[in-house]
Amino acid sequence: MDSHSLICFSPTNTKNLGMKVDSNIVLTAREREPQCGLQIMASSEEESMLHLDNPQEMTMEEFNSLKSEVAELSENEAQQEWLDSCRYGEVDVLRALLSRFPRLISYADSESENTGLHMACANGHLHVVKFLVYHEHKFMKNKSGNTPLHWAASNGQAGIVNYLTKNSTLNDIDVLEKNRFGRSALTEGFSSQKEGVVEALLEHDSATEDKLLSVSGDSKSQVVHKLFAKESPLLIRELAIVNGDNPFADAERPDQDTTGLSIWSASLVLARWLHTKSWDNSTIVELGAGCGVPGLTVASCNPNPRRVFVTDLNPQTVENLGYNIKLNEFDNVEALRMDWCDKSTWPKEKVDYVVGSDLVYQKSLVPLLSGVVMELMNAGGIFFYVAPETGRDGLEEFINHMKNECPEWKETKAPAEYHANPLTSGDDEECFLHFQELSSLKYMLYEFPKP
């Protein structure tokens, strides 16, 4: 018996879905008239639609006839028909097959190890996905290490990705788990260029930065990034922020601010900008240096600056600055624990340039910070500053204050190339997870020459 005779809807035409995650897989999906809005089911009706004896695409008489045909199939024929029906979205054929062959719910092809859930996810059959999950279909990898979520994400199936990532019964989902080609479901989501797919994946509990931090070093709370030039990358260790519920700390204890343990996107923009300047034999202070990306970028420039001071207040942040200096083997950089309110902690000499990024997040800081900047610089020195266009308390007041202090100020919007992925690996997924604001915010470049 020809098992394909079970398919009740003849194909009118076909379309090919090229799978990016399995180079040898091309799926074919039948196109036909929509089946009574099956892919958007009301919650009050959904459970009854998922039952084995409740056909949705044919009459009960047709369904009973179908079940009689299924009873004549061999197990091998049923297995092939199962995969085909999942691929084509024939949910009533699946009902009939599962009634006669209950073990099909856990069936995987012997060669590819593809499952019915893989097929339904790749081809966008949400009603079939719901049916399979309801009947406890396992969430399995195929031979290439791809999960059904990989295939849904690769093909931009936003509805299915959203359903899978929000289904509390699917405990095995990990959007960062990689296949044999080194690609995760999130990587495939980015490649699909479907915003809804990426958004659903990023909202899943497994899309955590802590998990990314575990890939490097001997601690799960750190990662060393290779930034900018592949031939001579800047090495920067980033640590997990301490006191995540209040990383900025209280106003009376600014030394407990741990935000500098992470790399902020504004510092990457500033670093790229500073790399275009000449620093020959000059002295530079970076305020609120955090991980030190801008200051260490300046130190790496040729001709070299005479001295670079990377400063911060939190002890652990300053310790990490020292680590990054040693990591890059710089001998012209010094890490200082600098208290803006205590001049004894400042560099012992005035400098030619002050640089900083995203330093203002409280309006009360404006008088203090502007005073520190002006007092650190020699006459004719320049303060280079980068900040988001909006969204920081006190930013407008700080910029206006600095414009009054430095009448020859300049400002410009950061060009697109300053927002590019800074990782030498080119991994857009990792870039987005670590530096989300790099793609979501607009940054301004400010230049304030001291009179």
Image (cartoon, helix red, strand yellow):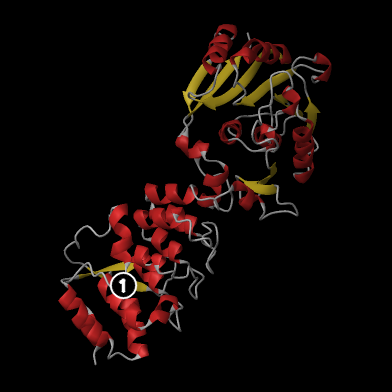
Under mark 1, the amino acid is Leu
In the rendered image, the quadrant that contains the N terminus is bottom left
The answer, for residue 278, to whether it is visible in the render is yes
In the foreground, 70 or 213 = 70
- Judge left or right: residue 99 versus residue 376: left
Residue 186 x, y percent position in the rendering: 48, 55
Judge whether 42 appears above or below 369 on screen.
Answer: below
When asked about the image quadrant of residue 182, the answer is: bottom right
Q: Residue at x 26, y 69 (%)?
A: 54
Q: Quadrant of residue 156?
A: bottom left
Of residues 7 and 369, the one nearer the viewer is: 7
The x, y position of residue 280, in whole percent, is: 70, 29
Residue at image coords 68%, 42%: 240
The answer to whether residue 9 shows anywhere in this view is no
Disc 1 crowd, CA 10 A, few/some/many (<14, 14-19, 20+): some
Q: Which residue is mark 1?
A: 52
Q: In the picture shown, does residue 271 fall above or below 371?
A: below
Residue 165 pos. (x, y %): 45, 55
Q: Nearer the viewer, residue 245 or 313?
A: 245
**367 to 27, vertically: above or below:** above
Residue at 54% in and 12% down = 397
